Image: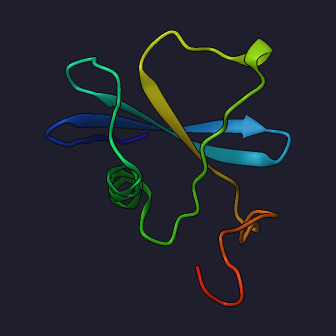
């Protein structure tokens, strides 16, 4: 899968087989290896560049017992086709 290079960040797009089907996994890291301190808007821009503006991506915060934190990467996930959204969203009364 392709790798996206930005001035400060690098990404790698992987396909992962899961019980739900093929899931896209976007890995994001800083080129200098430092901790990612980017805000939501910058991560959204990276997601848009790598996956497109219509992609719905999410980040997982697992139970502590399942945590793997070996390198300063961020991970975004996109569910397989047929998933138009998540069972929760940020919409309330027709507005975000």
Residue 34 percent across, percent down from the top left: 28, 19
Q: Quadrant of the N terminus?
A: top left
In which quadrant of the rendered view does residue 7 lie? top left
The number of discs equals 0
Whether residue 70 is situated above or below residue 13 in the rendered picture: above
Q: How is the image coloured?
A: rainbow
45 sits left or right of 55 in the view: left
Q: Residue furthest right?
A: 19
96 sits left or right of 91 in the view: left
Q: Residue furthest front?
A: 93
Q: Residue at x 78, y 38 (%)?
A: 18
Q: Residue at x 19, y 43 (%)?
A: 6
Residue 64 percent across, percent down from the top left: 74, 17
Q: Residue at x 86, y 40 (%)?
A: 19
Residue 96 percent across, percent down from the top left: 58, 79
Whether residue 37 is situated above or below residue 89 in the rendered picture: above
Residue 63 percent across, percent down from the top left: 78, 24
Viewer-proximal residue among 65 and 29: 65
Viewer-proximal residue among 38 and 55: 38
Q: Residue at x 44, y 57 (%)?
A: 51
In which quadrant of the rendered view does residue 66 lie? top right
Q: Residue furthest top?
A: 70
Whether residue 72 is situated above or below residue 21 in the rendered picture: above
Q: Residue furthest bottom?
A: 94
Viewer-proximal residue among 63 and 11: 63
65 sits left or right of 96 in the view: right
Viewer-proximal residue among 66 and 2: 66
């Amino acid at each position: 899968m392709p790798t996206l290079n930005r001035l400060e960040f690098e990404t790698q797009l992987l396909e992962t087989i899961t019980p739900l089907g093929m899931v896209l996994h976007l890995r994001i890291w800083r080129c200098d290896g430092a901790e990612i301190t980017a805000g939501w808007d910058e991560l959204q821009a990276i997601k848009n560049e790598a996956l497109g503006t219509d992609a719905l991506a999410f980040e997982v915060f697992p139970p502590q017992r399942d945590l793997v934190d070996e390198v300063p990467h961020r991970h975004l996930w996109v569910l397989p086709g047929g998933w138009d959204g998540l069972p929760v969203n940020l919409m309330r009364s027709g507005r975000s």
